[in-house]
Each structure stands twice: as structure tokens, then as C-alpha cells.
Amino acid sequence: MKKTIQNIEIEVFQGDIANLPNVEAVVNAANAQLTTGGGVAGAIHRAAGPKLYEECKPLAPIAPGEAVITVAYNLPNKYVIHSLGPVYGKDKPENKLLENCYKNVLKRAEEKKVKSVAFPAISTGAFGYPIKEATKISFNTILAEIPKLKHLQKLKFVLFSEADLEIYETMLAEM
Ligand code: AR6
């Protein structure tokens, strides 16, 4: 499903963040040490190859809400933007920290003049953020940031499960 808001195309679809050939930068739902792990981080590091971690190592650790950018090695993209989401119920205030993830990813992308970026649902897997709350935060943050974007033209949201996709589609339709 796609929608255009102030000339920015917003798309939500089901897929694997580590296999998206038509997007310039993909977002990693990282851990603080920027190592591989489960979920998105595992898929991204596996597909990118070991050089990704070599580039990440000196950039770590990062704090919740921060984002750093690297190249993408064997992934079909130009960049990976690594952001650490809040652990739900532990890192406070979790809504602000999650908002910072989306803001800082957009900042890193704009600094490199990136035209398209794909986000996973940061913090909603191992970190336990309820998907509906997290979706609201991601869309509200993106909406507020759209007027500041100079290079980005496409924002994509990749959901792993059908159920998460439905939540994103419903909220995008209401936007
Ligand atoms: N493509 C798209 N979405 C995915 C994929 C994939 N390949 N795999 C999982 N998801 P998570 P977090 C969805 O756990 O909650 C890692 O071990 C998943 O269903 O990857 O921010 C790191 O090393 C969920 O909706 O990220 C960290 O320690 C969403 O992506 C920690 O987990 C995020 O799930 C980060 O936890």
C-alpha cells in the first residue's frame, strides 16, 4: 500500500529487510554494540557479510535513540543505518527514545543525500514494544519530519508478519 504526503511517497509492505534491491538505505534494528543478533540485525549482518561488523565496531556503543550509518557491503543497498531502539519497560521515556530513532535515521539519510529508506518496526521484536503504539510513534514522527526533508523521496516500512502489515496499513490509511 502506498500513499503520497507532501510529495513524499510512503509505502508499507510485507518483506525481508535484508532483501530489498530497490531501496538506497535500509535501517537496522541494532543492539548497542552493533553486532549481529537475532531478528533484523541477524538478517542484515548475515546478508551483508563480516565487513559490516568491521565498520560498525569503532562506531559502537550507541545509546537508545541514536543512529549511525555505514555502507552495505553484500546487501543490495548502498547504506545501512543502524539505530538502537528502547527496550520496552526499561529504557525511559520509551516513546521519546523511539521517536529519536526515526528522527536520527532520517538525519543520517539526509546527510548522505539518500533518496529512499526502508524501516523495520524498530523495538517491536526482541525489545517488546507493542506494535500499535510503536506504529503510531513511527508515523507521527515521520509526518512531523516530512517538511524538513530535502533529498528523501521515498519512505518504506517493511513488516515481517501479516498481522503487523495490517496494523501499518490501517494507520497509513488514516493518515
Ligand atoms: N525483515 C523485516 N522485519 C523483520 C525481520 C526481517 N528480516 N526480522 C524480524 N523482523 P527485532 P528489536 C521484525 O527483534 O525489537 C536483535 O537481536 C520483527 O518481527 O529485530 O529492535 C538485536 O541484536 C519485529 O517486528 O528488533 C537487538 O539486540 C521487528 O522486525 C534486538 O534484537 C523488530 O524486531 C533489537 O530488538
Image: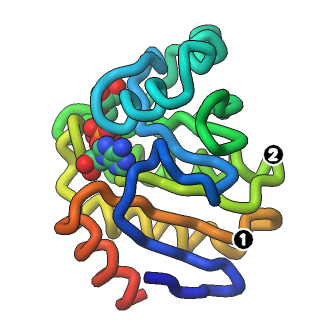
Q: Is residue 30 left or right of residue 152?
A: left
Type of amino acid under label 2 = Lys
The answer to whether mark 1 and mark 2 are in CB contact below 8 A is no
Q: Is 107 placed above or below 48 here?
A: below
Frontmost residue, 175 versus 52: 52
Q: Residue furthest bottom?
A: 174
According to the image, label 2 marks what residue?
A: 112
Whole-percent x and y of residue 81? Answer: 59, 39
Can you tell which mark lies on residue 121? none
Is residue 104 in sight in this rendering?
yes
Whole-percent x and y of residue 13? Answer: 40, 69
Q: Is residue 175 left or right of residue 94?
A: right
Whole-percent x and y of residue 44? Answer: 47, 33
Q: Is 30 placed above or below 151 here?
A: above
> SS of the residue at dot 1?
loop
- Quarter holding ligand 1: top left
- Label 2 crowd bin: few (<14), some (14–19), many (20+), radius 10 Å: few
- Label 1 crowd bin: few (<14), some (14–19), many (20+), radius 10 Å: some
Type of amino acid under label 1 = Gln
Residue for point 18% across, 43% down: 128
Residue for point 54% across, 67% down: 142
* The image quarter in which residue 87 lies: top left
Whole-percent x and y of residue 99? Answer: 45, 54
Question: Ligand 1 near label 2 (Cβ, under 8 Å)?
Answer: no
Alpha carbon distance from label 1 to label 2: 13 Å
According to the image, label 1 marks what residue?
A: 153
Frontmost residue, 83 versus 156: 156
